[in-house]
Image (spheres, grey):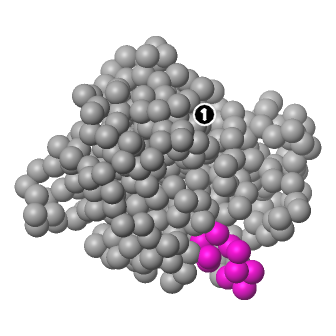
Amino acid sequence: MTFYYFGVGIEVIVEPHNKQQPVRAPVKDDLDLWYDKIAKALRNRKGCDQKPLKVTAESRRTQYRETRDRHLTWWITWDGSLIAPDWPRHPGVPLEAISPGLETRKRWEDEIDAFWSAMMAAIAFAVVFYDEQVQQVLPESRRNYHYCVPNKKHSRHLKGKSMSEVAASINAVQNKENLVEVVQGLSKRDRPVLWNFHNVTRMPFETETGPALGTVEFRGGRCLRGPVRTKRWISFAVAFIVLAIQEFKLPLKSSYTSSSSAQFWEKIRNAAATENMAQHLPKGYKTMNESNRSDITDDPGDDYPYDPPSSHFVPQSGSTLDFE
């Protein structure tokens, strides 16, 4: 039996329910105060095991980075990407909520074991092969955004290459570091791509000790302020990983049959069904990208205002998910 583990990073600016307790400016002076309040409130909630959530709060991220057990608890912390040109005029508290390790299980009937490198290569190829289709799934504000640039446009090894050339490049990789170099690059400035592979292995620029996390980070999710959309983006990202591993085996072929956006979405839903997650995905991909105006208000827990194409996008509306 193979287990899939994933984590969620939710970046958001929040406002207190109690309007009589406004957020003072500059909010950076009170981050620990607000983070402790949020953590305390979350500890009153029960998780899937019916036990109180385990939550840690700290604004400097030092403890989070240095703690080996960081995947055992929710972390309420700071993320530098939440700084926007018009912030701190925004009346809220910026934070990133990082989940503990979450799990979905699947019985693979045709495999007893899977080589990690082969799985990573399949995911890397799918990231390039389905780039246009994934872009259609993303909300307009997340397409080609500088915190989640498509890997195909960012990597010097992928720019201008045909799919047969991309397949040949991935087939030729000798190790995880080489794969990361091909799919995005090895420097710190190569990190903010749509599918971030930097946690697959130790990066040359890292100073921390210890093993790599072994995760792939999806950075394209939209603002998450309610359960429906949160489940949607988790299900989409997990389904994409499952689809990649199902569809692309090593050695990669020089050509594959292309799919329309609608066909790709049907594949995603089928892959999600193998993980019992299809119920969280809408029937059409246009509900995900919110181009269908009538589908936007279907989540009562998500009241983030709809941004028409002419509006100014504020970058604190992103979310990330990690997969292992």
Percent position of residue 313, x then y:
81, 53
Q: What element carries label 1?
A: loop
Tell whether 226 sits left or right of 172: right
Q: Which amino acid does label 1 sit on?
A: Glu
- Left or right, 257 with reference to 92: left
- Rendering coords of residue 33 (x, y %): 72, 38
Residue 166 appears in the picture as rendered: yes
Residue stretch rendered in magenta on the structure: 286-295
Residue positioned 57% across, 46% down in the render: 150
| Location of residue 190 with respect to 126 vertically, above or below | above
Q: Mark 1 points at which residue?
A: 58
Between 119 and 54, the residue placed more toward the observer is 119
Tell me what residue is drawn at x 37 percent, y 17 percent: 209
The count of marks equals 1
Residue 294 lies in the magenta stretch: yes
Vertical arrangement, residue 109 with respect to residue 158, above or below: below
Magenta-colored segment: predominant secondary structure = helix
Q: Position of residue 269 (x, y in %)?
A: 41, 75
Q: Nearer the viewer, residue 273 or 30?
A: 273
Image quadrant holding the N terminus, namely bottom left
Name which residue lies at 65% across and 36% down. Answer: 78
Residue 264 forms part of the magenta stretch:
no
Furthest-left residue in this view? 112
Q: Position of residue 42 (x, y in %)?
A: 56, 55
Relative vertical location of residue 263 with respect to residue 190 in this rendering, above or below: below
Examine the rendering and report whether any part of residue 36 can be seen: no
Please identify the quarter of the rendering in which residue 178 is found. Answer: top left
Q: In the visual, does 316 lie left or right of 246?
A: right
Query: Label 1 neighbourhood size at 10 Å, few (<14), some (14-19), many (20+)?
Result: some
Identify the residue at image location x=75%, y=47%: 315
